[in-house]
Amino acid sequence: MIHPENSEEYKGLTVNKGIEQPSTINPYRSFKRKAKRPLPSANEYVEGILKGNITLLSQAVTLIESTLPEHQAIAQEVIEKCLPHSGRSIRIGISGVPGAGKSTSIDSFGMHVLERGGKLAVLAIDPSSERSKGSILGDKTRMEKLSVHPDSFIRPSPSAGSLGGVARKTRETIILCEAAGFDKIFVETVGVGQSETAVHSMVDFFLLIQLAGTGDELQGIKRGIMEMADGIVINKADGNNIEKAKLAAAHFRNALHLFPAPESGWTPRVLTYSGFYGLGIKEIWDMVYEYMDFVKANGYFQYRRNEQAKYWMYESINEQLRNSFYQNPEIAAMLPMKEKEVLGGSLTSFTAAHQLLDKYFNS
Ligand code: GDP
């Protein structure tokens, strides 16, 4: 008897022709590359922005932040056209070290401001964002109430380029936001030094958030930053921290007396508050409005804005010259060699710089 597996009828080891599998590629799909939707024209952006269209505003801000020359060209045209519609807002710089409570406070301040009507844009300048590739300032998730308010616009810090470049982009964003009807602008920054100067150069009121410490709160804070402040506010004055906050406020008041009187003629105030519990927020905003009345009456408001416009003209010149220099192919080729010579001691830094600049301007 033959084994069933050896019988001719046995099919167990033969492979049946299977069902033909359909191609995994859809034969009806056209592989012609879809043409990218063209960007709106500068005029379309401007029209949308003036109507308060947030999508177009956001897209235009993205163009400001882009490094592509064609994006920059449209962005500059949009800014130019929005400029006559800008300027009618209160611009407030808000600074404090990480953990001081900036986002919690901006959430409370912002909601308080919006209760009185108007629209609020929250922008940021974060000098560290280039390194960390992504800014934490102006992050929507940190401003829970404000981020879902229909009259707020929150935009994190632009992250590419030098501090000057980042600051310029934020300043240009202010112009677009104002043209879109935002009448209050907050510019948030971390209290580390240079970025305050940049923020100070684009706001009307500079608010410094501080915390009560162990009696030596003045130690860590740079004199220059304090001198810039139009108001110093001590946060977290709640629970059993109230007395400490009051003590810190007294320290700051004493320290401010030692500074020369500010150009504005305004005497900077020191207040305590709690961003988390919403205590003392009204008093801070009353102070801002009082300041605005004061500087508008004595002419300092317009003077400061003019000075800022002048500052930004020079900043733009500097930035463009610097970019043009470093993007010059001959310079880019020469730089590593010159750097080596300087490091090797065969050339001084000054001579190397001189040779490079000479090449740039005379070739
Ligand atoms: P930022 O880094 O300056 O933006 O600070 P955050 O707003 O993220 O706040 C840092 C921490 O301080 C968070 O845990 C907040 O909940 C807390 N905080 C902020 N404001 C207050 C306040 O007014 N009182 C108290 N007790 N805690 C606060």
Image: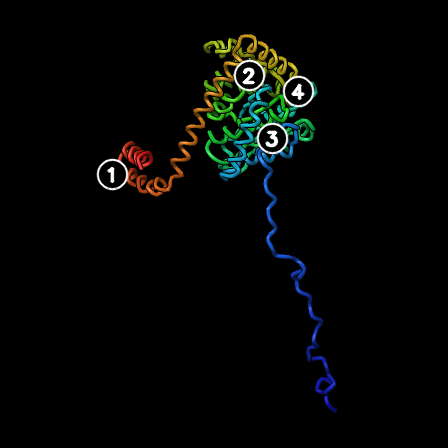
- Determine whether the residue tagged by mark 1 lies in a helix, strand or loop: loop
Residue at image location 66% in from the left, 31% down from the top: 53
**Residue lying furthest bottom:** 1
258 left or right, relative to 3: left
Instruction: Give the residue number, with chain letter if any, for mark 4.
Output: 113
Q: Earlier in the sequence, mark 4 or mark 2?
A: 4
Instruction: Give the residue number, with chain letter if any, for mark 3.
Output: 46
Residue at image location 38% in from the left, 39% down from the top: 328
The one nearer the camera, 183 or 274, is 183
Q: Earlier in the sequence, mark 3 or mark 1?
A: 3
Please tell me how crowded label 3 is: few (under 14), some (14-19), or many (20+) other residues with Cα within 10 Å: many
- Is ligand 1 within 8 Å of the beta carbon of the residue shown at mark 2? no
Instruction: Give the residue number, with chain letter if any, for mark 1.
Output: 346
- Determine whether the residue tagged by mark 2 lies in a helix, strand or loop: strand
C-alpha span from label 3 to label 1: 55 Å
**Residue lying furthest left:** 346
Relative height, residue 55 to residue 8 (above, below): above
Relative height, residue 184 to residue 253 (above, below): below
- The amino acid on which the numbered mark 4 sits, given as a three-letter code, is Val
59 left or right, relative to 261: right
Q: Earlier in the sequence, mark 4 or mark 1?
A: 4
C-alpha span from label 4 to label 2: 19 Å
- The amino acid on which the numbered mark 1 sits, given as a three-letter code, is Ser
Q: Position of residue 37 (x, y in %)?
A: 61, 44
- The amino acid on which the numbered mark 2 sits, given as a three-letter code, is Ile
Instruction: Give the residue number, with chain letter if any, for mark 2.
Output: 232
